[in-house]
Image (cartoon, grey):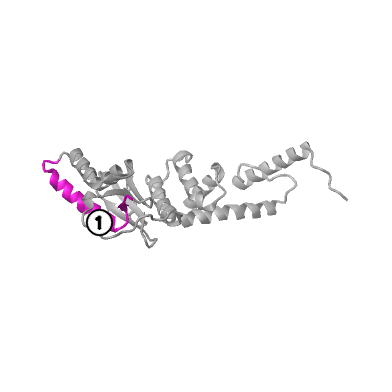
Amino acid sequence: MTNAPLNANTMVDFKVKQAEFAAYIRDPLNNPIPADVKADRMLMYRELFFNNINSFLSGNFPVLNKLLTETEWLALTEDFFAKHECKTPHFSEIAEEFLYYLEHERDTSNDLPFTLELAHYEWVEMALSISTTNLTHKTVVIDNLLAKKIKVSPLAWPLAYQYPVHKIGPGYTPLTPPEQATFLIVYRNHEDDVNFLEITPITYRLLEIISEQESVMTSACLEQIAQETQHPNPEIIINGGLQILNDLYQKGIIGLEG
């Protein structure tokens, strides 16, 4: 006995049913249960899909999760699940999709004001920990970094935030940003440990200069920062900057070109 081939009407019906199925799973409050499907079965499917997403997000954004009540967190993840159309089939990329949702699709004034920045910071830590990129440079003892070409490690991300995201937690939830922005480097070292450093605006600018040119002579980088700061004694900036770059080199945040 052979099965009858699918005709165009069958395909249309399948697509309609598939759309109804997905709509209910995403947003059961605003979409009916598909016809001819038992309610308890749809509830089971819905719970399975949502719990997977909820568990993944709570694991990747643990600080944000702890700052919200269970009701607030569920409302946030339910809204993401209902509104955002994920472009990736990979669970490891859902956290990035969540960031896009927070920045472009989240429609509420009730969120904590640092929600997006905190989520981004938590995502960076996760992204660096699972990155398949390996450090291509080794930290060796050098006598004169000033005469070397340097580059920023692909596993070192300089970051600037309005809020001190690295300090935020259940015991510290600032509702207004401080006067000074927060500058950080989140990086993965040769032992594959993810760490962070709080840095000064000048250090952040040094890393920007290096990144903008892919690689640059250390001396040229320091001369540029001395010119930009217009310090009356450029040698102070150059010597201080060289100490900073030596420290970043030892941590694997910058490396030698070639």
The quarter holding residue 193 reads: bottom left
Q: State the predominant SS element of the stretch in magenta.
A: helix
Q: Is residue 234 magenta?
A: yes
Which residue lies under the disc numbered 1?
A: 247
Q: Is residue 91 above or below residue 227?
A: below
Residue 181 image point, x, y percent: 28, 45
**Total numbered circles:** 1
Q: Is residue 11 magenta?
A: no
Please give the name of the residue rendered at 16% of the width and 46% of the height, measured from the top-left corner: 237
Q: Residue furthest right?
A: 1
Q: Nearer the viewer, residue 224 or 21?
A: 224
Residue 55 image point, x, y percent: 52, 56
Q: Residue furthest front?
A: 258
Instruction: Give the residues in magenta.
Output: 231-258
Mark 1 neighbour class, 10 Å CA radius: few under 14, some 14 to 19, many 20 or more: few
Q: Nearer the viewer, residue 197 or 181?
A: 197
- Residue 11 visible at all: yes
Q: Is residue 83 above or below residue 184?
A: above
Please give the name of the residue rendered at 47% of the width and 47% of the height, measured from the top-left corner: 96
Please give the name of the residue rendered at 69% of the width and 54% of the height, measured from the top-left corner: 41
User: Is 49 displayed left or right of 6 in the figure?
Assistant: left
- Residue 175 visible at all: no
Q: Residue furthest left?
A: 232
Q: Amino acid at mark 1?
A: Asp
Q: Nearer the viewer, residue 172 or 105?
A: 105
Please give the name of the residue rendered at 86% of the width and 49% of the height, measured from the top-left corner: 2
Q: Is residue 196 above or below residue 160?
A: below
- The local secondary structure at tag 1 comes to helix
Residue 229 image point, x, y percent: 18, 40
User: Is 110 displayed left or right of 253 in the figure?
Assistant: right
